[in-house]
Image (cartoon, rainbow, N blue to C red):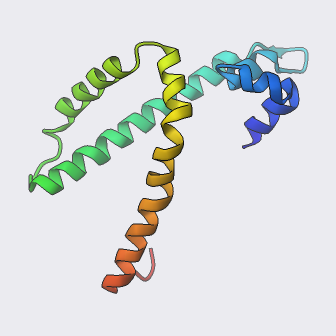
């Protein structure tokens, strides 16, 4: 949220809306004192690291969930095939940045509403209905 506020304050709302990668554009403009300029490589390193961590987490959760549903004892056998499937689907669906941007603006809001809001509420209601409550962490 702070980065979004910074982008809007530096570039104004109209220009910030037109930027493809506003955080990267902000990193190109920012200079810390006279000695630290052009820090976009730091932003890219953080971005790539967080994307790799997110992909690894999603791959782990997907393989673990699929192994649980399929009744497999070991989830690690599914990881290479799910990783290859992930790469194949990403290459088929996203030919360029325009298709990714269209997906982001047209499909993501509805998907995010379901996955981030309706699904957790549904799971909470099912847990309350079944009477299963955890005490403590």
Say whether residue 63 is left or right of residue 21.
left
Placement of the N terminus among the 4 image quadrants: top right
Place of residue 43 in the rendered image (x, y in percent of width and height, measured from the top left):
65, 24
Q: 125 or 107: which is nearer to us?
A: 107
Q: Can I make out residue 32 in this image? A: yes
Say whether residue 88 is left or right of residue 28.
left
Seen at 76% across and 22% down, the residue is 26
Place of residue 34 in the rendered image (x, y in percent of width and height, measured from the top left):
90, 15
Vertical position of residue 111 compared to residue 29: above or below: below
Count how many numbered circles sit on residues in the image: 0
Placement of the C terminus among the 4 image quadrants: bottom left
Q: 96 or 72: which is nearer to us?
A: 96
Q: Can I make out residue 132 in this image? A: no
Seen at 35% across and 83% down, the residue is 129
View extreme (front): residue: 106
Say whether residue 104 is left or right of residue 43.
left
Place of residue 124 in the rendered image (x, y in percent of width and height, measured from the top left):
42, 73
Q: Quadrant of residue 127?
A: bottom left
View extreme (right): residue: 34
View extreme (bottom): residue: 131
Seen at 64% across and 16% down, the residue is 41
Seen at 9% across and 56% down, the residue is 71
Place of residue 73 in the rendered image (x, y in percent of width and height, measured from the top left):
9, 53
């Amino acid at each position: 949220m702070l980065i979004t506020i910074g982008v809007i304050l530096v570039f104004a709302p109209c220009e910030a809306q037109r930027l493809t990668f506003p955080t990267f554009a902000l990193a190109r403009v920012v200079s810390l004192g006279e000695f630290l300029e052009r820090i976009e490589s730091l932003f890219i390193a953080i971005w790539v690291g967080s994307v790799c961590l997110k992909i690894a987490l999603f791959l782990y959760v997907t393989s673990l969930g699929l192994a649980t549903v399929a009744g497999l004892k070991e989830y690690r056998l599914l990881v290479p095939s799910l990783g290859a499937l992930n790469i194949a689907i990403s290459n088929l669906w996203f030919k360029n940045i325009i298709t990714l941007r269209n997906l982001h603006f047209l499909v993501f809001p509805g998907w995010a509403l379901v996955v981030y809001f309706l699904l957790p509420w549904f799971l909470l209601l099912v847990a309350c209905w079944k009477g299963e409550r955890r005490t403590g962490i």
